[in-house]
Image (cartoon, rainbow, N blue to C red):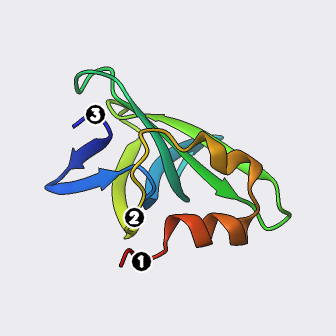
Amino acid sequence: MANSYIHNDKRFHIGDTISIKYKIREDNKERQQEFKGILIKIRGADQNTKTLTARKITRSGIGVERIIPLNSPHIVDIKLVKRGSFQKARLYFIRKLAQREIKQKLYRTKK
């Protein structure tokens, strides 16, 4: 499947909320930072070129996107926070939506 990714026996799909922990080095100190956002794009053919694009809305209402190369040695862990129920290959349309509208579209239950 082109719009899913498997990491440690967990399958991630477009529209899922994921949490990515990665290492940051500052002034000879190393710490871990977490980026929690909605998976809007999976790109790449094999494990060496695969990247994930996640988007989150900050407390001040600004949207932040992060492109994560999966072969990076700085990635510590990727966890699934919430499963989405969307069937598109890319979720670029959420860039224009507010946080409440995104939750209504992505996490509604199908009947």
Report the side of 63 relative to 23 (left or right): right
Q: What residue lies at 17% left-to-right and 53% top-to-bottom?
A: 8
Q: Secondary structure at mark 1?
A: loop
* Amino acid type for the residue under numbered disc 1: Thr
Q: Position of residue 71 (x, y in %)?
A: 32, 30
* Amino acid type for the residue under numbered disc 3: Ala
Cα distance in 3D space between marks 1 and 2: 7 Å
Report the side of 63 relative to 81 (left or right): right
> Which quadrant would the C terminus be assigned to in this image?
bottom left
What residue is pinned by disc 2?
85
Report the side of 96 relative to 39 (left or right): right
What residue is pinned by disc 1?
109
Residue 48 versus residue 58 in the image, above or below: above
Foreground disc of the pair 3, 1: 1
Q: Secondary structure at mark 3?
A: loop
CA neighbours of label 1 inside 10 A, class few (<14), some (14 to 19), many (20+): few
Q: What residue lies at 13% left-to-right and 55% top-to-bottom?
A: 9
What residue is pinned by disc 3?
2
* Amino acid type for the residue under numbered disc 2: Ser
